[in-house]
Structures are given as structure tokens and as C-alpha cells.
Amino acid sequence: MAVRTVNASPLIRSASISTISLILPHHVTPPCNFPILQGRASLRFQVMRCRSHVDLRRVRSYSVQSLVDLVMEEFLATRPKTRVRASSAKLQIAGSLEVVDDKVEKKVLQRGLLVEFRKDSERVMLAVVQKPDGKKNWMVTDQNGVMSSIKPQQVTYIIPGVKDIDNAEISNFVNEANDNMDPALLEFAWSELLDKNKSVTVDELAEIIFGSDGPLESYCAHLLLSKDEIYFTVLETKGYSSVYGPRPTIQVEELLRRKRAKEDADKELEQLTQLLKSAKTMPPHAKPSKSSWKVEDKVWKIVRSLEAYAVDACENDDQKKTAGMILKAMGLPKTSSSAVDLLINIGYFPVHINLDLLKYNIRTDHPEDVRLDAESLLYESLDLDKIDRIDLTNLKVYAIDVDEADELDDALSATRLQDGRIKIWIHVADPTRFVLPGSKVDRDAMKRGTSIFLPTVTYPMFPEKLAMEGMSLRQGHVCNAVTVSVILRGDGSIAEYSIFNSTIRPTYMLTYESASELLHLNLEEESELKMLSEAATLRLQWRRQQGAIDTTNIEPRIKVANPESPEPQIKLYVENQSDPAMRLVSEMMILCGEAVATYGCANNIPLPYRGQPQSNIDPSAFSHLPEGPVRSSALVKIMRAAEMDFRKPVRHGVLGIPGYVQFTSPIRRYMDLLAHYQIKAFLRDESLPFTAGQLEGMASMVNMNTRIAKKLFSSSLRYWMLEYMRRQPKERRFTALILRFIKDRIAALLLVEVLH
């Protein structure tokens, strides 16, 4: 009787062997349909893995190991050599490895065979072949007892020596094979075959590793090779059989290095995934702060990649890959919305995150150097126009704006001349008192283009301290301004105008609501406010005679307190642009724009002149529509795109004036600031800072940022309006005005009772 070890092989380097079994060699095993399962109870491989590169076959130990070595030497001397058929066909591998072509045994499918087949892209199963199904396919019964039709291409291996096995025994066979899967066995076989420059088939590898090429041993060898990505490579395949060759040492070392790197990365991924899962389960008040995610570089890399993925703004493939890997590890779809939800759930994003701020890469904070320069300007800058300023502190000055306005950059005064005409002063904040063209603060403002006003927050164009304390008009304080004075004719047209530097002391800071109330009270002591309202009425009548289109509307406004909270406070109200105070301010701003355009044209000053061609459709075509929001909505739809010229005024057909320059918001709009630079230089009799061509180039970038700011405002306003409506009781009913029909069963509505 020959001796064979079940848990070791002649070619395996083993530090110790714990069990020795005496069994019949495979060539005298009694024949049966399933020899491995029926010939012995089980096959166990308990080979201790060797962690060094020492050839332990040459190491002799004491006691049990000595006996094992003697048995192994005897076994090597008596066991038959593995049969290898010769062939003239050779393939050079790793410089000198020869592969025998006819090692590959051609196998064909037939009834009763036990085969491994690919169920789908992720599952591999065993099945017994039953019968042909059509010309090419075969019916098989898998290890779960399910019969199905498979294509020959799905078969990945035919287990040798098994015929007509009961499919109920397949699961035991699979479990037995999985129990004996030890990847370390491949390393031992690879080393031996590489030394001898030999290729190997699955059956031959089973002989080398397990000392047998029986069904179970062969299938174990097949599994090891099919899962191996380190030691062996396929040299040749015919049908369902393959020849494998050992990879060169340098290639194996590189693959092992990559494998260890991947294992380390997988371990790190698991740790990061657990961190994210832990944060998800925390209550809102206990979640990590946003800043805490930035402390550790590897964590910040993950969060930053998810943030970029959330807004479809990945800077490179690595960010996209990292985000996708995290989402997959978290069991989430690889979508931007999944990334958003995850960042909200871990506390990095607030519940009501404004994704557009991230998508458009809006700079919400001013750089430190810009902020420091801006603060120094408050105390160190000189007023170049000090000696030329006209003192208007004796005038009553009204500053009228929305109640949440932070930057106040225009105010109004009025008086009646002896001939009965009304003289108006439009006082505009003078930011050029502090900021010069080309300075660091100016360049930063140009990049922003405008202040951004959202229901939740305002992002100012200038650093807040400079804008609020230095530039803005403040009640009761002496403020620098650029004043545009206009005398109106009786029909509302401009009779005289002038532009000069001034100092004013704002008397009232009024909201539109309070200004309207004062107008309604008609107080004698506020006659100046009444004169402004009278002038606004004259101007509106005159502009309409010039072809102006009335586009006043009702606009919603929303103010959101504590937006970081999951349930912030939402205040919703409306602006009726036909309100007396709003109409007054609007008309005075248009008047100022016309006067500045006229002044620029008369003095040949390049300015950002705005115009808008008249529509080809006569507005009277909409006279049948109700006056107000419905008619205004229809008229807006037919308006043509605005135009700009930087050399001369362009008629503004919608406003009904010969020229127009935006001038009254230089703290909030950079294009207004450019007009100030030009006008102020002209008043000092200095060279103008910009040519028409330079203005046009700057306007291109500024207008792009302005359009983005408008999109941000519109999307944010829509979001919070929907959030407001979502919170209303389901049974609540609203009264709405139909503005227009978009298409069948879809209409644009104006809710008129949102506050009740």
C-alpha cells in the first residue's frame, strides 16, 4: 500500500503538518460515479501557509516532521510520474518557458456531465447536463434543482470523472471544494513550476498540489486558477480546457504589490464607509460639524469628491471614481442626487442646501487680502473730490428701499421752483471715493459683477464693512454722494440737468410700505415727498406718450430666517410695482439714467449705454387683456432683447426714453460703478480710465456673472416658494389669477392670497 498525504503534497513548502492519513492511491480507488465523495468521507487540506521564501522542503525538523519527510521521500520515489504528451508546437513564455500544444484535451458537452457555467455577470454555478435544447443549447439542472437552457459559451469548466450525478449532491461537492480553497497552494506550485520552466493543465496542477486529479481535486485546482490574478496566466485554450503558465517573478512581485495596495485601499474604504454610516445614524444635533470633515486629509478627499459629484462638477476622473466608489460602498446609486442625500444625512450639507451656489462656483467670501485692503481704505484713502463737493446737507433726503436692504446707494430730494417747476435731486452713493480702477478691491468686485441677493443671504460685491460703513448712505450721517439734479418741464420731460459731487445727510430711511403710508397721509410737513410723487406721475405720463410699455407687475419676495435649520422660518410677501412708493422710486431711477445718458452723449463720454428696441407687435394688440399682471405678462413676452453701446446712447423703446445708463446702484452693480469711474474722471478733468473698447470687454464678463446671479435668485426664490407651499395644509385652497395658457391644461398662475 502506498502512502499519500491528504493535507500536504510533494511540492508544497510547509512549516508543519498536523495530520497524516493513509488511503488508497487514486489508481486503485474502487470505481464509482462520484469517486471522491463516495470513496472517502471528505478531503481536507490543512496546509500551514509559509510566510518566508525559504525552501522548507530542505529543512529537517524533529519528531513528527522527520517521519513526514521520510514518508514523503518514499512516496516521491514510488508514485508514477505525471504523464505529459510531447508535441513539436512550442510557445515561449517569460523568455524560455515551453508549452506543449497538445496538453489541451478537447472536451465536448454531453448528457450526464457535471459542468460549471456562468449564470450571469456575477454568478457561477454547477449543473448536470440533461439533454440538447435546439441545435446548440443544452438543458441543465443546477445545484438548486432549477432546470434552464444554456449556451455552450456559458460553460466555463467540465468537471472530469463525474457522470450522471444527482443534482442534490452538487451542493455538498461545492461546499467541499470551498472548504479546501487555499490560495497559498498556488504560490507553492508557482514557485516549483517557475523553477522547472513548466506549464500546467488543471488536472496536472491538481496532481501537483493534492496528489490526485480526481473530480474534487481538479475542481479545486480549477477554482484556484480561475480566481487567481497573481501567479498564473492562460497560455492556450481549446474548448473547455486551458494550459496555464507561471508568471515571471518580477511580474508576480508587481501584482502582489498592487494587491497589497488594493487591500490597504479597501481597508481604508471600509473605515471611511463606517464613518459615514455612523454619521448618518446620529440625530441632527449630534452630527459632526462641517469643519470637522476637513480635518483629516483622506476624509476631506472623500467629502470633497462627493460634493463635486453632487453638482456634476468633478475636476478630474479621480474625483468621479472616488465618489462612485463611496456611493457603491454605501449601497447607493451612482447619481448626483444620491451624493446630495448622503452629504445631507451626514450633516455636511444643510437640509436646504443651495446646490446652484456650488454648481456655479460662486465665491461667497472675500479673500483675506481683499478684505484687509478694503478695511484700510476706510481710514487711509483720500477724498480726491473734497474741494469740489457741493454741500447739500440742508436738503430733506429720502432713502426708500426694501426693509431688508443692507446697502443703501440712492436717495431723493425735491423742491418747487418759483415758476412752479419741480427740481429733483437723485443722490447716489460714491464708492469711487474709496476704490480706484485697477485696485485689488476693484478687481475683486469686477470678478463678482454684482451683489447676489437670495432669500437666505446676501453676498455683497464689496467687502461688507467697506460697503456698509464707508459707501452706503446712512440716516443722520454726512455722506459723500454723486448727485444728479433735474428740472422737469410741465409735461414731464427734462428741461435742465447737471451732475456733481456732493455731501448729503439722509433724513429718512423708509421702506416702501412706510413711504406709501406717508404719501397716503398727505402730511404738510412731508411736502417734498408729495412733490416727488407728483414728478413721478408726470414722468410716467410723458414716457407713455413716447411709446413706453407699462410692465409693472406683482412680484413675490421671500425672506428666510435660520436657513441652516431643517425647518427654517419663511416670510413670504409681495411687491406690487404699481404701489405709489415703488412707482415713485422706479420713475426717479429711470429719470437719473436718462440724465446720465444725455450728459455722456453731450460730453462724448464712453459709458455702458443700454437700449431696447421696440417690439414689432403693437402693444395695443393686447388692450383687450385686463390691465395689470395679465397684460404685463403678455407684453413682456413680446419684448426684444436689450442692447448695449459704449460710444453713444441707444433708444430704450420699452422705457420710452432716448438713452439710458444704469447709475444708481454702484455698490451693488459693477456696470454702474464703471459709469461712475468715467463720470468722476470727467468731472475732475482727468483722462478717462476706460475707452469704449475696454468697457465692452469688461462688460462681457460682468454681464455673464450678472446673468448667473439672476438665475441663482430665480431658482432660490422658486425653491422657497415651493417649500412654503409644501408646508401648507393639504385642505387649504388658494385664489389664483391665470396669467396665460402655456399649452393644453397647463397655465401660468399668480397666487393672490398667499398671505391669508
Image (cartoon, rainbow, N blue to C red):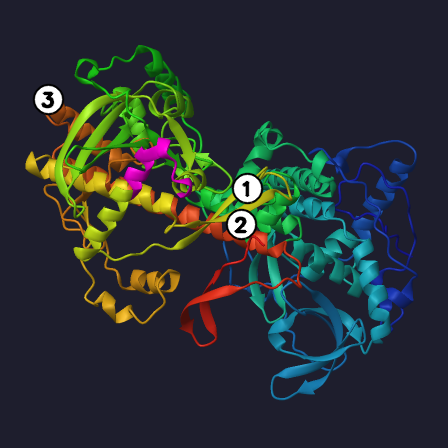
Mark 2 vs 3, N-terminal side: 3
Does the magenta portion include 532? Answer: yes
Above or below 304: residue 644: below
Distance between mark 3 and mark 1 Cα atoms: 46 Å
Q: Position of residue 693 (x, y in %)?
A: 13, 38
Mark 1 vs 2, N-terminal side: 1
Task: Give the side of residue 66 with respect to residue 58, left or right.
Answer: right
The amino acid at mark 1 is Val
Instruction: Answer whether labels 1 and 2 touch (C-beta < 8 Å).
Output: yes
Task: Give the side of residue 211 with respect to residue 368, left or right.
Answer: right
Q: Position of residue 703 (x, y in %)?
A: 28, 43
Task: Give the side of residue 117 with respect to residue 554, left or right.
Answer: right
Q: Callout 1 environment at 10 Å: few (<14), some (14 to 19), or many (20+)? A: some
Above or below 485: residue 330: below
Front residue of this view, candidates 1 and 39: 39
Q: Callout 2 environment at 10 Å: few (<14), some (14 to 19), or many (20+)? A: many
Q: Is residue 655 visible?
A: no
Above or below 350: residue 229: below
Q: Which mark is residue 560?
A: 1
Distance between mark 2 and mark 3 Cα atoms: 48 Å
The amino acid at mark 2 is Trp
Rendered image quadrant of residue 315 = top left
Secondary structure beneath disc 3? loop
Q: Which residue is mark 2?
A: 720
Residue displayed at 82% across by 69% down:
170
Q: Position of residue 498 (x, y in %)?
A: 14, 31
Q: Is residue 724 visible?
A: yes
Q: Which residue is mark 3?
A: 686
Q: Which residues are magenta?
A: 520-533
